[in-house]
Image (cartoon, rainbow, N blue to C red):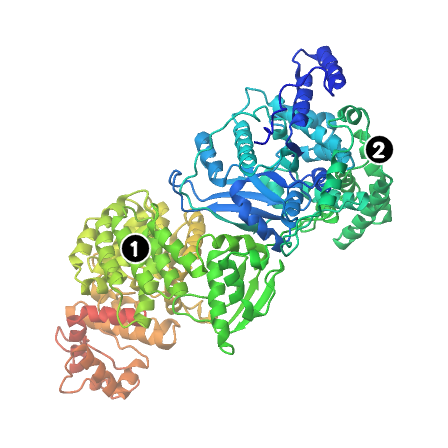
Amino acid sequence: MPPHPAEHAGEATPGGTFTPLRDQLAGAAAAFASGGLLPKLVDDVERAMAVELEIFPVCHHSPASALAMARRLRAKQPKVIYLELCEDLRPVLEELRNCKLPVALQAFATQLDGFPPGSGPLSVIAPITEASAEYQAISYALDTPGVELVLVDRSSDHVFQWEQARADARSGQTDVGIEIGDLRPRFAELEEHLLHHGKVRHWSEWWDQYVEQPLSGADYDTYRQVMVLIGSLFRRLRGPGGPPTDDEDRERYMWTRMREHLRDTGTDPADCLYVCGAFHAASPVMDEPYEITGRTATRWLYGLIPSSHSAIERQFGLAGGSVSIAAATWAKALRRGGVKPYRLSTKPPAATPAAPAKIKAAKAAATGGPANADMLTGFLASPPALDELDEAELLGWCVDLVRLARRNGYLASTADAIAVYETSILLAGMRNRVRPTPYDFQDAAVTCIEKDVVPGRRDVRRLCEILLGGDRFGQVGYHSLPPLAQDVFDRLEPLGLDLSKRTIHRALLDLNADPQLVPVSHLLWLLRRLLPADAARPIMGSRRLGERSHQESWDLALGRHQREIIELGYEAVTVEQVLEQRLRKSVSAPDATAARALEAVEDAILFLGGGRLAQELGARAVELLAAERTVDEAPDVLRRIRRLLAFYRSNEPALPEWCERFVTAGYAHYCTLLPTAFVADDTGLRQVAAMLGFLFTMENLALSLGCDRAQLELAVKQSHPESPAKVALLWAAQTQLGILDRQELRRRCDELLAHPLVVPTFPQYLSGFVQALDPVPSLGPFVVEVISKAFARLPDDVLLPWLPKLITTLRDQAGELLPVLIREAGRVFPGRLATLDQWTPPWHGQGTGPGAGAGSGAGLGAGPGALVGASGQGGAGSAGAHGVGGPAGAMAGVGGAMAAADGAMAGVGMAVPVPGPVNGLLAAHPATADAVAALLGAEAPASGWEQGLRGPGGGGDGTGLTIGAVNAESAGGAGAGGSPGSGAAAALVAEHPRTAEAVADLVGA
């Protein structure tokens, strides 16, 4: 049985090696306080030095720790290295051979078993840089035959078990960073005190000045004792009243694992090296037993992800640029001290043990000299000496910075380089420093060069970071990537680009000329869907339902998003499987909605070919729609179901079963919620308009599938909104259903405009009419008329505050509203600027009072016979006579004539001959007119209707059109100049009013 590794870890004896230092510090403590803290620090150092198992204290990403580790490994050459790192990450370490540092070890879990629902995904990240003691230990152990590397810290599963046990106040923590050697004061007062008296800005600068630089050239014993002393200081100053931590439990866990390994393998503790944070080196619980619990059934996945200096700084709260400065310090120390660091080879070494003579000589060199000699006293009493190389290095920094600044637009010169050099030395002296540090150099550069700040230009502090090494980015090698990431890069090989680089690549794809690029295009669109937006950005080309690109252009930055691609590999083997799983998860989530399910159906069709998956997602969309109790996403539902129906109708012989179920369920669902939505204050106007749009546009399909139109009519009749905008929307719905005719609708709007108390709220009515353009597009001419009247008659103090809302509404819903509005406005308003001054609106002069009947000139859509609104008294259309040329004017003449015919039949008007080319056109093509009449179901008169068009004079210029006209001298009947055909046309229009309205809507009335 090997000796206990902590058998000499008892309390220090009064006559030990560190007695003089203890007495000196005890005297200082007695002079200032009576707590006895300083002697206890020395006791901790002596206890750590007395342990048979050699403890190597480190600090995270510390060049001094890395240098001391490299020296110690070459001197001692241990057979076993115990490393403070999650024990389940051990298999991943072999993959570091194919990586470019910095990278991070990652444990990732999404399928949780044993943790509270909703607490995932869980992730443990342990970054590694070359300038770190842990990398030196890993490289030595993996590349040296016969050396065993044992990770002794708690597993990733235990990390979150412990977090869950005491994380009621931190329930949102799902991503934990693991530091090997977290050495920092545990309470703000101490850190603030150190920063203030050290005349530094942040902790990284204090550590670099007072620990890193002095220890870079120190011997191993000095380094070890100083690090244990600092760790003991921070540990004891935390105090018993600090926040609860699991530091001591972690130490018990690690020491238990080491004792188990020593017992199982029979290894001599003298041949081992324990690498841990300095905070844990002076642990008082080394020999305490600890029962390690089992892991949960959670399935953990392991891998490597690329990291960077800036990512490490953000993850652990370090100052910006501190890791880059540490890397520069590491490189400088290697050049100056001649230390040969350990670096992993790309291939595992041959299994040949080292020569016994060399091992024996190395052990003799390692144990030479007095054991546990007091090196602290001399180190604490003497300041570090100034190195001559620092002056030359500072000069080089100044010159290189001026050159870099000029490249970035600064007007720097040699004088600025001299000023930076002198200011750096001045700042170091003011801060009681022996030599200028990189932080002094940064401050001096900002003071001397950055005299102003120019937007879009790199600041000088960033230039200093670039000069000192910059933000280095790691990269995971191809052979260390998960299968999914390898599959992605393999499938993108036809592009002929090195996508592992961090630069942005432009990829041009001619899919017609090179069909082999079609799968590449499909994969790029998949990556566009799964990765961040700038990872794969299309410059030309699109992917929507029913569309196919012939040429595409892409900006690819996959090298910058290697981590995201790697993490996709934790979910599935291919990107298609990842997307399928995510789509299923999105529609099964507790907050899933029908709109999200329809979006998933679209993605399934676009990226996965639809099929069975689309059917399942569509069925889930039907269930979600039926279960919804709000209509917040009704616009999104309407837009997506329209798009899907159009796609299936153009690409499939029949609609899928889920589409039919969705339409019928949606029809009944929205009919039920419509009365409540009209009166609910929390339901927006656009949502109600989308509900009406669904009901009206899907009505034919819903009725063919068995729905009852009475549902919609009852829902509209039961709706009693109070908001003016919703009232206007209800009027539009009533007009669409035939409950309210357009003449009555026009009369109501004119009354609102004429009422002085209602005028301030009239813009809200306009908002409702504008929203009605999507569900009731036939209302477009009327909306143009109402908006024109509002702009002409509303005062500025009412109109101007409403304009921004109108503009934002039209901008947000441009795809639905603007086409209808612009098309109708183009039909009504003159097409040439020269005719604008003489133009008269078609609705000008229309009567709206009780005496205004059908024969008084129905305007835009006023009655069954009105194709285009007519102005003037007696019902004659005057659009053609007021400058509206072309077909619009001609149709206006026909509309006026038909309105006059209606008035003549009612006995309340008199027809006036209408000039224009329409009569001549009809007389010249009687066969076409007969075909239209037959299509409408009218019977041609025996005497021929074309005689009525030519008139009594037989002319063909259209001046004798008197359809249904009453002779001025006749009290009734068909006048002397009448034609039998005119009565037939009027009777046809009167007999088929809905057909006439449809024709009027078709031609733009």
- For residue 260, above or below residue 991: above
Crowding at label 2, few (<14), some or many (≥20) Cα neighbours within 10 Å? few
Q: Residue at x 37, y 57 (%)?
A: 599
Question: Which of 420/102 is in front?
Answer: 102
Q: Position of residue 727 (x, y in %)?
A: 28, 49
Question: Which of 124/85 is in front?
Answer: 85
Name the kind of residue labelled 2 in the image.
Ala
Q: Earlier in the sequence, mark 2 or mark 1?
A: 2
Tell me if residue 934 can be seen: yes
Question: Which of 992/99 is in front?
Answer: 99
Q: Would you name the residue on which mark 2 appears?
A: 385
Which mark, by number, is residue 621? 1
Left of 933 or right of it: where is 88?
Answer: right
Q: Residue at x 23, y 59 (%)?
A: 661
Q: Position of residue 470 (x, y in %)?
A: 70, 49
User: Which corner quadrant holds the N terminus?
Assistant: top right
- For residue 955, above or below residue 171: below
User: What SS does tag 2 mark?
Assistant: loop
Left of 701 or right of it: where is 880?
Answer: right
Left of 618 or right of it: where is 933?
Answer: left
